[in-house]
Amino acid sequence: MGNKDAGSTDLAWKVTAAAATLASGFVADKVVALGWRAITGHQAPREEDQVLEYKLMEVVAFAVISGAAIALTRQLGLRQAAKWYVKRHAPLPAIEA
């Protein structure tokens, strides 16, 4: 019975972590796009047909900023999800390497 409970706890955490990751990625993408437009006055360089319209340094800057924003919001989202999960369910399941 212990293994079944551990399996359901593991699945519940995986679902929680996946939801937090998706939500944080969506938020980061929207924030970066809005910030880019507010600062530069034009759309973020996302589409392949638009990339040639931008200077190389703009594309590099966008890649660095968006990558950092996504990584940061993902970590913050997972931390908040872990806090919520531990309060309502149980300790987080062990991560196997």
Image (cartoon, rainbow, N blue to C red):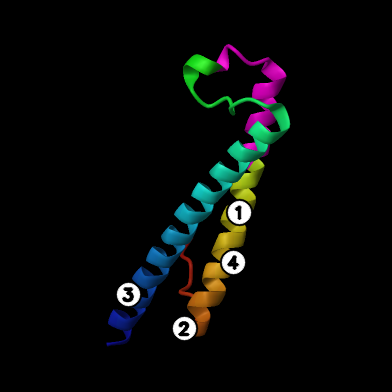
Crowding at dot 1, Cα within 10 Å, few <14 / some 14-19 / many 20+, comes out as many
Residue 71: x percent and y percent? 61, 48
In magenta segment, residue 52: yes
Q: Secondary structure at mark 2?
A: helix
Q: Would you name the residue on which mark 1 appears?
A: 73
Please tell me how crowded label 3 is: few (under 14), some (14-19), or many (20+) other residues with Cα within 10 Å: few
Callout 1 secondary element: helix
Instruction: Please tell me whether mark 3 or mark 2 is closer to you in this view.
Output: 2
Chain part drawn in magenta: 51-67
Mark 3: which secondary structure?
helix
Whichever of callouts 2 and 1 sits on the residue coming sooner in the sequence is: 1
Query: Gap in Å between the C-alphas at discs 3 and 2?
Result: 17 Å
Which is more N-terminal, label 2 or label 3? Answer: 3
Per the image, the residue denoted by label 4 is: 79
Q: Earlier in the sequence, mark 3 or mark 1?
A: 3
Q: Which mark's residue is nearer the viewer, 1 or 4? A: 1
Q: Residue at x 44, y 83 (%)?
A: 89
The disc, 1 or 4, on the residue closer to the chain's N-terminal end is 1
Which badge, 4 or 2, comes first in the chain's sequence? 4
How far apart are the alpha carbons under marks 3 and 1? 28 Å
Q: Is residue 73 left or right of residue 93?
A: right
The amino acid beneath tag 2 is: Arg
How many numbered discs sit on the rendered protein? 4
The numbered dot on residue 88 is 2
Q: Position of residue 83 (x, y in %)?
A: 56, 75
- Cα separation between marks 2 and 1: 22 Å
Please tell me how crowded label 2 is: few (under 14), some (14-19), or many (20+) other residues with Cα within 10 Å: few
Which residue bears the numbered disc 3? 7
The answer to which of 11 and 47 lies nearer the viewer is: 47
Depth order, front residue of 21/7: 21
Query: For residue 10, which numbered disc appears in the image?
Result: none
Q: Label 4 is placed on what type of residue? A: Arg
